[in-house]
Image (spheres, grey):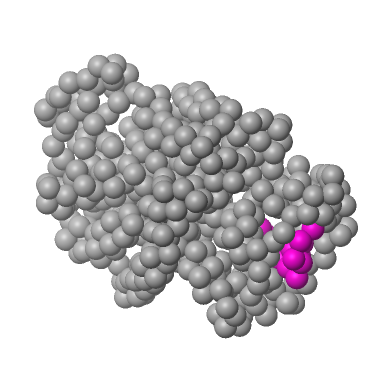
């Protein structure tokens, strides 16, 4: 890769240059100067301020349509393949009793994503840029490296989800399926040239695909009859009394918030061309809050649907006989993604059930990998002010996931997929506080946010979410580390 260092200047990123520029101080209370951060280094510069928004006098729906999109891209991180295993296990083992945990995790995610969007709107900078500007210089390298590792870990789970889906749909060897998923860089490159609205539309199509697949499985296939009264009771009467329930609840909450989503959301809100006056900022904060709430509510419905499907199909069963007479046994350590595909058809009496499951899994993996690439661009440019060609950025990220996945799958076989997904969650547990605590600190600072600093409600909800998520991660960390060591050392 060609590259050179340029101080206080703008370089042509299409030639692979690396750019270093010194940021301006924001105006207290109104974020950056009227033109935003220093020209030549804006968040996701190719699409920054590329979407016009109507005047504040325009109707609600016109404004809502203009601001809707960034949270949709972020929401796919909350329904990616890494979440499927815990949701399936929760429904299979405890029926609806962990629905309230899914709801709690989604509620905390709304709070944190609202704060990330608020930071981007008010300061005109993303979370990585703010960390670079307001924290000591020595923190840049470790924070950037940690976030790159987190993005690589997230990409690993997404890659494996897509590869398993290809394996299930087309019976490709898992190693070949992993390699095929590496070429999705071409999809992202094609989309970037069409603008952020096209990316948002494609992600919306993927999310709709997932929702339709689960809607058909739960509400159309005749063998399934969900009990809404029982589900409502499970939501309103939280409890962790059964053996093993706490550990699984920790897994659901710990796998919910992805650190890269906080960085990405603070950058995506800047794709809207927002004026810097008080009224425009207030409007942008309002509609981004609505956008976050709606998008993550959809993510909650999909996660809840995964849990409900598992509860209806697997709860109370010890095993099931599949085609050919093989017996699949259910247990706490089962590979629930693969089991679900193998057993949905015989349990529901139609091959369509397994096909819909695999299609939804593929849509989940592909949508998540697109947003992971954008997040990688945000953290690299924000922390280090380095800019490289998007396809190089994508290949670096994907290679970090492909190589270990192929090596371990070839050595240990397809059964290692669940272990690899769990391993990615261990890494996220370790890295997540490095994103959570700066986000709360920065958005609570009146020096940085001015009048838009967190009020007492956001302070309470935000710090409560951060402390609970961090505590859950720490609680599960010893067992997670033991599981990670088993992956490295072998069975």
Quadrant of the image for the N terminus?
Answer: top left
Task: Return the x and y of residue 328 as percentages of the image width and height.
Answer: 74, 55
Image: magenta residue range: 305-320
Q: Which residue is located at x 52 percent, y 64 percent?
A: 252
Judge by depth and name the residue closer to the eye, 279 or 95: 95
Q: How many marks?
A: 0
Q: Which residue is located at x 33 percent, y 32 percent?
A: 45
Judge by depth and name the residue closer to the eye, 308 or 44: 308
Residue 367 visible to an observer of this rendering:
no
- Reply yes or no: does residue 314 show up in magenta: yes
Judge by depth and name the residue closer to the eye, 95 or 466: 95
Image position of 48 with respect to 247: above or below: above
Task: Return the x and y of residue 92 as percentages of the image width and height.
Answer: 68, 65
Image position of 35 with respect to 75: above or below: above
Q: In the figure, is residue 422 to the left or right of 87? A: left
Q: Quadrant of residue 393?
A: top left
Judge by depth and name the residue closer to the eye, 265 or 36: 265
Residue 170 visible to an observer of this rendering:
yes
Q: Which residue is located at x 30 percent, y 67 percent?
A: 454
């Amino acid at each position: 890769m060609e590259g050179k260092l340029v101080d206080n200047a703008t370089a042509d990123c299409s030639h692979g240059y690396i750019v270093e520029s010194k940021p301006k101080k924001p105006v207290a209370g109104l974020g950056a100067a009227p033109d935003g951060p220093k020209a030549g280094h804006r968040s996701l510069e190719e699409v920054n301020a590329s979407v016009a928004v109507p005047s504040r006098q325009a109707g609600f729906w016109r404004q809502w349509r203009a601001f809707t999109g960034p949270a949709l891209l972020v929401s796919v991180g909350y329904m990616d393949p890494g979440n499927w295993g815990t949701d399936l296990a929760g429904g299979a083992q405890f029926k609806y009793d962990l629905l309230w945990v899914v709801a709690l995790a989604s509620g905390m995610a709304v709070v944190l994503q609202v704060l990330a969007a608020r930071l981007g709107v008010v300061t005109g900078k993303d979370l990585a840029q703010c960390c670079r500007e307001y924290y000591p210089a020595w923190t840049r390298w470790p924070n950037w490296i940690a976030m790159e590792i987190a993005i690589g870990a997230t990409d690993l789970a997404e890659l494996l989800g897509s590869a398993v889906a290809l394996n299930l749909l087309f019976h490709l060897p898992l190693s070949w399926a992993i390699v095929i998923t590496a070429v999705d860089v071409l999809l992202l490159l094609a989309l970037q040239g069409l603008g952020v609205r096209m990316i948002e539309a494609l992600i919306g199509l993927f999310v709709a695909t997932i929702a339709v697949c689960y809607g058909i499985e739960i509400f159309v296939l005749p063998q399934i009859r969900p009990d809404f009264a029982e589900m409502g009771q499970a939501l309103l009467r939280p409890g962790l009394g059964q053996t093993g329930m706490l550990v699984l609840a920790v897994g659901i909450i710990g796998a919910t918030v992805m650190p890269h989503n906080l960085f990405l959301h603070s950058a995506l809100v800047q794709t809207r061309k927002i004026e810097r006056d008080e009224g425009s900022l207030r409007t942008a904060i309002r509609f981004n809050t609505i956008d976050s709430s709606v998008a993550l509510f959809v993510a909650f419905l999909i996660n809840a649907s995964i849990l409900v499907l598992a509860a209806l199909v697997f709860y109370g069963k010890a095993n099931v006989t599949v085609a050919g007479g093989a017996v699949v046994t259910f247990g706490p350590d089962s590979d629930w993604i693969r089991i679900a595909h193998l057993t949905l058809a015989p349990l529901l009496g139609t091959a369509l059930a397994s096909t819909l499951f695999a299609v939804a899994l593929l849509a989940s993996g592909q949508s998540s990998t697109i947003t992971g690439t954008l997040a990688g661009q945000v953290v690299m440019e924000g922390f280090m002010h380095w800019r490289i060609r998007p396809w190089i950025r994508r290949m670096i990220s994907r290679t970090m996931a492909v190589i270990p996945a192929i090596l371990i799958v070839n050595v240990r076989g397809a059964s290692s997929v669940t272990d690899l997904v769990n391993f990615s969650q261990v890494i996220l547990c370790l890295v997540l506080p490095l994103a959570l605590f700066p986000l709360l600190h920065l958005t609570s600072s009146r020096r940085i946010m001015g009048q838009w600093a967190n009020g007492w409600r956001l302070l309470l909800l935000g710090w409560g979410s951060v402390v609970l998520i961090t505590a859950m991660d720490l609680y599960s960390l010893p067992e997670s580390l033991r599981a990670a060591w088993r992956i490295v050392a072998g069975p």
